[in-house]
Image (cartoon, grey):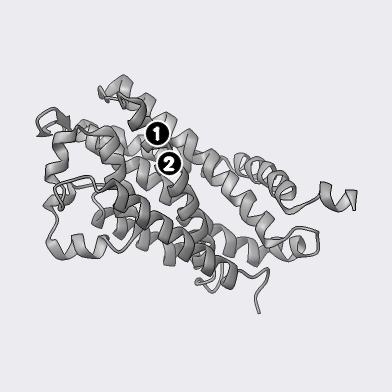
Amino acid sequence: MNKVNKNGPIRLGLLRGKIEIRQFMRQRESVVFTLLFPVILLFIFGSVFKDKIAPGVSFSQYFVAGMIASGLVNSGFQQLAIMIPMERDFGTLKRLRGTPMSPISYFIGKSILVTASMLVQTFALLLFGALFFKLHLPHSVALWWRFTWLIILGSIASTVLGIAFSAIPKNGRGASAVVSPIVIILQFLSGVFFVFSSLPKWMQQVAAIFPLKWLTQGMRSVFLPQSFATKEPAHSWETNRILTILVIWIVIGTFFAIRSFRWSEK
């Protein structure tokens, strides 16, 4: 009984998380692309677009908010929806099935990897933005608290949705071709690369179905002045609605992740 307790699903998940991070760090190309790509985009866009998009709001300030939200989707949804089919093809999941590890432990391990990579990305964006593009950091405890729960809920939502979507690609080789275009389209629709209110109404309505739009809006509420809220479609940040929608997507993602996850091809 003591042995079972010591190797419960949470502890196994934590141990799996350490392994996930070590394996990820060994893939130098993936580390550079995943962790530094948002910083590279900030450098490019921040250097090209130097105009103010509103009083006291530079494009770099707006772009950082979108890239932090987008980084959650890249680290969670995109990375897992591609990685899990590849691990299934390589037989990694089949071998794990023969161990005491449950799907819950596996999910916890992936969540740890997503959280760790997201924290590094976010820190790099904030540091680089503050040093080179005069990024204004949140100025109150309330804003930092909002930033914290956005990161937590966004990480969880991206993780469970990535696991759920990993059942869609038929194999690991085709996973990137299926997942990457979806992420890129959502980034354009959700106001990551463009001011959201400048998009056509039908694009705004489509984007509102998915969590990335609400994550980017939530991050804007953290990094942009309160006066900018009037430029949002609802003329407010809609913080409570953001919280509700992210929780709904977490429930949906968890349901389908549990229902659709499989250790091997049928």
Where residue 210 appears, x then y in whole percent? 33, 61
Q: Is residue 195 above or below residue 100?
A: above
Element carrying mark 2: helix
Q: Amino acid at mark 1?
A: Trp
Query: Residue at position x 26%, y 54% from top?
Result: 190
Element carrying mark 1: helix
- Residue 70 is marked as none
Location of mark 2 (residue): 149
In this orientation, which residue lies closer to the viewer: 26 or 93? Answer: 93
Where residue 180 appears, x then y in whole percent? 40, 59
Please rate how many residues cluster around mark 2, counting C-alpha atoms within 10 Å: few if below 14, some from 14 to 19, many from 20.
Answer: few
Quadrant location of residue 96? bottom right
Mark pair 2, 1: CA separation? 6 Å
Q: Amino acid at mark 2?
A: Trp
In this orientation, which residue lies closer to the viewer: 242 or 32? Answer: 242
Query: Residue at position x 63%, y 51% from top?
Result: 108
Where residue 263 appears, x then y in whole percent? 68, 68
Q: Is residue 119 above or below residue 191?
A: above
In this orientation, which residue lies closer to the viewer: 35 or 242? Answer: 242
Is the C terminus in the top left, top right, bottom left or bottom right quadrant? Answer: bottom right
Please rate how many residues cluster around mark 1, counting C-alpha atoms within 10 Å: few if below 14, some from 14 to 19, many from 20.
Answer: few
**Callout 2 touching callout 1 (CB < 8 Å):** yes
State whether residue 166 appears in this view. no
Query: Residue at position x 68%, y 54% from top?
Result: 105
Horizontal side of 120 relative to 40 (left or right) equals right
- Residue 145 is marked as 1
